[in-house]
Image: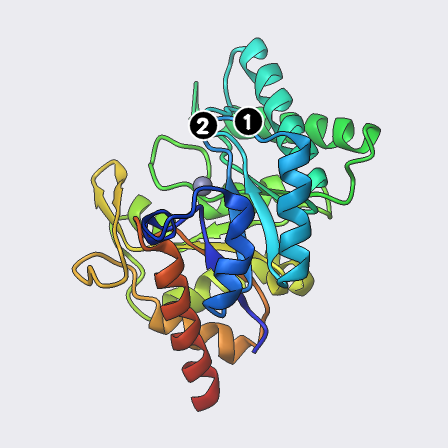
Amino acid sequence: MAAKFGPAGNSKSFYDQGNSSSVDMPRWLADMGLDAYEYQCGRGVNIGQTTAAALGQQAERYGIVLSIHAPYYINLASDDAERIEKSIGHILKSARAAKWMGASRVVIHPGNVADGRKPSLERAKKALAGAWRRCKDEGLDDVHLCPETLGKKNQLGDLGEIMEMCRVDDSFIPTVDFGHLNARDMGWIKSIQEYEDILRVIEDKLGHDRLNHMHCHFSRIEYTEGGEKRHWTLDDAQYGPDFEPLAEALCRWDISPIIICESRDVMAEDARKMKDIYISACNKA
Ligand SMILES: [Zn+2]
């Protein structure tokens, strides 16, 4: 029973209770019995070194593992070389901020398919290799780059493509967003069997160690034919996928991922619910 749970960004209630700075999140999360926090740089890496270091100190004090979500506008699959170069710059900025705060993982959206899936994938792999080389040149090699499975069909990042990207370097860790995987293929995840199929693919392609330490995102996501439409909460049970069978699979496989909840507004509250579901599943297993 070693999976860690936490939110993507800050719950609405965190602000409603009068808090305003993410530096106060680690204590707030520890009070809720959570153990992880994904700092959001989706709209840009705007955190300064002093704030990042303060956040890192609080996280260490309260036993919260940190990750960073890199900007959404990164596109490593683009057929525009300048766009790719800029994207690599955003990965480097994210990795620097990660180092300042002691976050070991940088979550990256690969981008949109341009002229075809194959050439787009090849460009993304090359860009990740380039980004990683520059991270190492700057001494940022204790940070793990974590390409994420994406929710729309026109985005690069189905499970197989993320496996390919992670094979660029042994240090890369997959970010497996189960809501995205479910949404991009019309709600196919129905039971423990589909979850176990996903775990099997990761183990087969990347080995047990990277499966064991994988990074996960989870939320219920509404979809259309193109894939992801909107994130919902655990209580919005009309949208999939269900967390219970995933919890059961994680216990059965005895693996220790970091699981970040991306529910809308109540991400920390839902992370706590997911942790409870997980604990009770492992106690039954
Ligand atoms: Zn993401």
Percent position (x, y) of residue 146? 59, 44
Above or below, comparing residue 16 to residue 90 in the picture: below
For the point 25% across and 36% down, the residue is 226
Q: Secondary structure at mark 2?
A: loop
User: Residue 195 placed where, x, y %?
Assistant: 41, 65
**Whether residue 136 can be seen here:** yes
In which quadrant is the N terminus drawn? bottom right
| Residue at the farthest left position | 238
Callout 1 amino acid: Asn
Q: Residue at x 68, y 34 (%)?
A: 50
Whole-percent x, y for residue 91 in the image = 62, 29
Q: Amino acid at mark 2?
A: Arg
Q: Position of residue 6 (x, y in %)?
A: 48, 59
Label 2 or label 1, whichever lies nearer to me, is 1
Q: Quadrant of residue 245?
A: bottom left
Q: Residue at x 34, y 73 (%)?
A: 244
Q: Secondary structure at mark 1?
A: loop
Q: Is 22 rendered above or below residue 248?
A: above
Q: CA distance from mark 2 to mark 1?
A: 9 Å
Picture quarter with ligand 1 = top left
For label 2, the residue is 43
**For the residue with label 1, is its CB less than 8 Å from the closest atom of ligand 1?**
no
Compare residues 276 and 168 and report the one nearer the observer: 276
Q: In the image, which disc is placed on residue 1?
A: none
Q: Are marks 2 and 1 in contact (CB under 8 Å)?
A: yes
Q: Nearer the viewer, residue 116 or 234?
A: 234
Horizontally, is 66 left or right of 178 in the view?
Answer: right
Q: Which residue is mark 1?
A: 46
Depth order, front residue of 160/95: 95
Outermost residue toward the front? Answer: 18
Left or right of 9, for residue 163: right
- 54 left or right of 83 in image: right
